[in-house]
Image: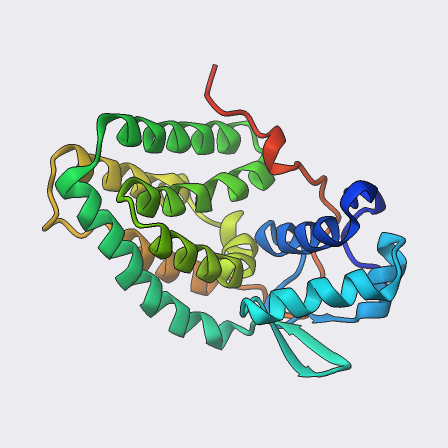
């Protein structure tokens, strides 16, 4: 079985970290669908590595909750049902970050969040949904960063790698309002210092939009897409 990843994604200088990063980004950008089954030996062969770094990467992702080890031969991306639980937790955690931001966000932190939304919008306008999918979680993580809550930022990051395959599988069917518009509503609440206005409603609404857009076959494979390393993403809109 050929997985939708490319051999050149693996940087030989730091093989273990590169294999992990490649698989993590594959989850984030929709290369692996919800409930898709992964096989360590096949991944290793395609990436041109031994089994050990591929297995270590899988085990690390499983420890983060991004993959489920049903058995040594049955490794799965999270099923759709698990996202229901994650959605409830995200609403609370991201709501906590947004409420803290609304009370005390700095001008510099607000400008950084605005820039992330602009970059996300530009990627969508350019038809580059892969890049848009990479910017999307940066905004959500940025809420916790702006609030000065590094532990909360880590927790949100762990949840995002779990929910990313669902978001990616549905992103193309989202309207522009669903992709970015609710982020702009969050920004406006922060500008207004309105901690009573629940900016985390975007989490609730995006789930309502995503659920009907789920692929009919959860095991279906996405087409091969070009990977764009995070450090090569533009940092501002020209």
Q: Is residue 86 left or right of residue 22?
A: left
Compared across the picture, whether 227 is left or right of 101 comes to right
Which sits in the foreground, 42 or 56?
A: 56
**Which colour scheme appears in the figure?**
rainbow
234 vs 197: above or below? above
Residue at the image position 69 percent from the left and 55 percent from the top: 20
Give the answer, above or below, for where 72 lies relative to 116: below
On the question of residue 200 being in view, the answer is no
The residue lying toward the viewer, choosing from 52 and 211, is 52
The image quadrant that residue 110 belongs to is top left
Please indicate whether residue 50 sits to the left or right of residue 22 in the image: right
Left or right of 199 in this view: 121: right
Pick the quarter of the image with the N terminus.
Answer: bottom right
Q: Position of residue 82 (x, y in %)?
A: 47, 75
Q: Residue furthest top?
A: 238
Q: Residue furthest bottom?
A: 71
Tell me what residue is drawn at x 90 percent, y 60 percent: 45
Image location (x, y in percent) of residue 93: 30, 60
Q: Is residue 211 visible?
A: yes
In the image, residue 175 lies at what x, y percent?
A: 42, 44
Q: Nearer the viewer, residue 69 or 33?
A: 69
For this rendering, which residue is in front, 195 or 119? 195
* Residue at image location 45% in from the left, 29% down from the top: 119
Q: Position of residue 89 (x, y in %)?
A: 33, 67
């Amino acid at each position: 079985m050929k997985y939708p990843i490319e051999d050149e994604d693996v940087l030989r200088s730091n093989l273990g970290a590169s294999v992990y990063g490649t698989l993590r980004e594959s989850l984030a950008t929709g290369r692996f669908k919800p409930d898709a089954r992964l096989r360590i030996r096949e991944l290793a062969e395609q990436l041109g590595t031994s089994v050990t770094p591929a297995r270590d990467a899988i085990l690390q992702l499983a420890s983060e909750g991004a993959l489920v080890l049903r058995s040594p031969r049955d490794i799965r991306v999270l099923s759709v049902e698990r996202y229901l639980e994650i959605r409830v937790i995200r609403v609370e955690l991201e709501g906590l970050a947004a409420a803290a931001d609304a009370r005390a966000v700095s001008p510099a932190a607000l400008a950084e969040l605005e820039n992330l939304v602009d970059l996300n919008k530009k990627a969508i306008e350019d038809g580059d949904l892969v890049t848009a999918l990479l910017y999307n979680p940066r905004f959500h993580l940025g809420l916790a960063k702006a609030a000065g809550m590094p532990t909360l930022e880590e927790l949100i990051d762990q949840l995002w790698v779990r929910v990313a395959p669902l978001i990616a599988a549905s992103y193309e069917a989202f309207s522009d309002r669903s992709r970015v518009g609710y982020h702009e509503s969050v920004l406006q609440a922060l500008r207004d210092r309105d901690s009573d206005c629940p900016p985390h409603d975007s989490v609730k609404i995006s789930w309502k939009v995503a659920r009907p857009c789920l692929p009919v076959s959860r095991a279906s494979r996405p087409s091969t897409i070009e990977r764009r390393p995070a450090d090569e993403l533009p940092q501002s809109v020209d």
